[in-house]
Image (tube, grey):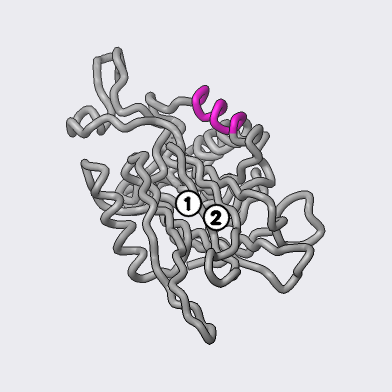
Amino acid sequence: MEIVEFAPQKTATRYLPWDSTLKIMPIGDLHIGADGFKADLLGRYIEQGLKDNCYFFGMGDFLDFTSSSNRERLINANLYDSARTVIDEAADRLVNTLAAILKPSAGRWLGMLEGNHMWCFDDGTTSDMALCRALKAPFLGSCGLVQCRFRDATSPRRTITCDVWGAHGYGGGATPAGILNKLHRAMESFEADVYLMGHLHRLVAEKVSRLYCSHSPNPKIIERPKVLCGTGSFMAGYQQGSKYAGRPHGSYVERKILPPSALGSPVIAVWPKRAKHEGLPVLEMTVTQ
């Protein structure tokens, strides 16, 4: 698990201004290379996210290139070096194509996770790591936590941190409740404010509350909300007229008769405020889908 301290652009310190709003747009499960990848839609989301001053969080499965089982089969095939080179070059072309679409967002990524769809190059790096380099994004590996700090310039000792936890995800789940159940289990193990998970292509969110007792001579109950979010996808599972080898042939979503998923990404907005009774800093959050 990787931990990253977020350093915002256009500030002299690692802190966000107290009166600002941190907007986070998770982007993942793109599956470039698949017939259903929606490059135009992804470009529109990135464009709108930049207009809204969002920062991005990469959720993995950027390429539709070798799942875990595919990589194992290729490794065990004892391919010639020349065959490995051809595969490396194909993966690199997909990374470069995707990096060109995402280029306007370079430098505005809180971090990027590793998905189960990616390619491992001969030097030990992966296609996910190559995309991170191209977009100046911290590589978070399988699971990551990013700390985003707010500070009041008029009272520098008044600070608060928003912890954003993310994992690519695992397993199946045909209903929106499936991914929320996984996130509730994650919330039992990891203390954070925002919980993000991809993999299931579900665009769904829930805002929950946790109650704390203040440590003061006159204790009060203080609410601190949390956001649980399935981060969506940019691959359409059902494509009219889709073909493989010249014949009608659907994606794995169509072949398994899985439910179609709403495409796109959510936006989580986070800002600090004072607790009603104590005047202590707490966070407020909203999420739009």
Amino acid beneath label 1? Cys
Residue neighbourhood size for the residue with mark 2, other residues' Cα within 10 Å, grouped as few (<14), some (14–19), many (≥20): few
Badge 2 marks a residue whose secondary structure is loop
Callout count: 2
The image shows residue 283 at horizontal and vertical percentages of 54, 60
Would you identify the image quadrant in which residue 262 lies? top left
Q: Residue at x 34, y 51 (%)?
A: 68
Please provide the residue range marked out in magenta.
39-48
Residue 94 shown in magenta: no
Nearest the viewer among 88 and 63 is 63
The image shows residue 176 at horizontal and vertical percentages of 26, 43
- Estimate the spatial distance between the alpha carbons at disc 1 and disc 2, rounded to whole Å: 6 Å
Badge 1 marks a residue whose secondary structure is loop
Q: Residue at x 43, y 72 (%)?
A: 221
User: Does 63 appear above or below 101?
Assistant: below
Q: Which residue is mark 1?
A: 120
* Cβ atoms under marks 1 and 2 closer than 8 Å: yes
The image shows residue 142 at horizontal and vertical percentages of 44, 59
Nearest the viewer among 151 and 190 is 151
Amino acid beneath label 2? Thr
Would you identify the image quadrant in which residue 95 lies? top right
User: Does 195 appear above or below 199?
Assistant: below
Q: Which residue is mark 2?
A: 125
Would you identify the image quadrant in which residue 3 lies? bottom right
Residue neighbourhood size for the residue with mark 1, other residues' Cα within 10 Å, grouped as few (<14), some (14–19), many (≥20): some
Q: Main secondary structure of the magenta part?
A: helix
Quarter of the image with the C terminus is top left
Nearest the viewer among 128 and 147 is 147
